[in-house]
Image (cartoon, rainbow, N blue to C red):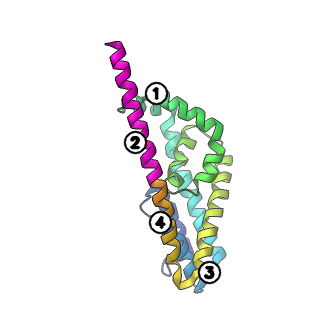
Amino acid sequence: METIGAPGAGIAVALENLFPPLPSEVILPLAGFTASRGSFTIVEAIFWTTLGSVVGALALYGIGAALGRNRMRRIAAKLPLVQVQDVDRTEAWFERHGYKAVFFGRMIPIFRSMISIPAGVERMHLGLFTLLTLAGSLLWNSLFVGAGFLLGENWHVVEEYAGIFQTIVIVVVVVAVVWWVIKRIRTLRRRDAESA
């Protein structure tokens, strides 16, 4: 972190949006710890990491916008267990809750990266998307950079607690996906039995 500096931390966070295995829960507190040692200021750490978050989110937004609704429907029609109506329901949900999803999604592992794609597909107003991403990222990054700054040599404690939170999120997502797959298979079997 001392070698790459605050701009390097920002680049790492931007890449984390595109490659989630690079965890911001490690990058951010480490940037805070490095700031506490005087390599750069905490304000620089927060500025650059937040800029990185916004740039990474805009790249994913662009991918979603390039993908578009029609292509998304064609992809959904070819996926097993997925129906075009699922895309329609997701779009309707995003239309109602998209602003909250973008803001709060910046603070949830996994969703932090992925929420930008449906925002792009739905062509959420770019200025508003950027503002919500900036606000959510600034809050999240300030919390983790500040924790690393205050904990100093013990900055890794933040990673441990963030890891617990991430594990909970992953378990909830896996349970939800399994429940959805089971429900969909039962629905398809019932339809097949009725048509037979």
Main SS category, magenta section:
helix
Q: Amino acid at mark 3?
A: Leu
Q: Amino acid at mark 2?
A: Val
Residue occupying image coordinates x 42% and y 42%:
177
Pointers 4 and 1 in contact (CB under 8 A)? no
Q: Is residue 193 magenta?
A: yes
Q: Which residues are magenta?
A: 171-196
Q: Please identify the quadrant where the C terminus is shown.
A: top left
Using the numbered discs, state the Cα–Cα distance from disc 2 to disc 4 in whole angstroms: 22 Å
Q: Is residue 158 above or below residue 72?
A: below
Label of residue 163 in the image: 4
Front label number (4 vs 1): 4
Residue at numbered disc 1? 84
Using the numbered discs, state the Cα–Cα distance from disc 3 to disc 2 in whole angstroms: 40 Å
At mark 2, the secondary structure is helix
Which of the two residues, 192 or 13, is positioned nearer the viewer here? 192
Which of the two residues, 18 or 157, is positioned nearer the viewer here? 157
Label of residue 150 in the image: 3
Label of residue 115 in the image: none
Residue 48, quarter of picture: bottom right
**Of label 3 and label 4, which has the lower sequence position?**
3
Residue occupying image coordinates x 46% and y 30%:
73
**Of label 2 and label 1, which has the lower sequence position?**
1
Pointers 1 and 3 in contact (CB under 8 A)? no
Pointers 2 and 1 in contact (CB under 8 A)? no
At mark 4, the secondary structure is helix
Residue 11: x and y in percent read: 51, 66
Using the numbered discs, state the Cα–Cα distance from disc 2 to disc 1 in whole angstroms: 19 Å
Using the numbered discs, state the Cα–Cα distance from disc 4 to disc 1 in whole angstroms: 35 Å
Q: Residue furthest left?
A: 196
Residue 29 located left or right of residue 176 = right
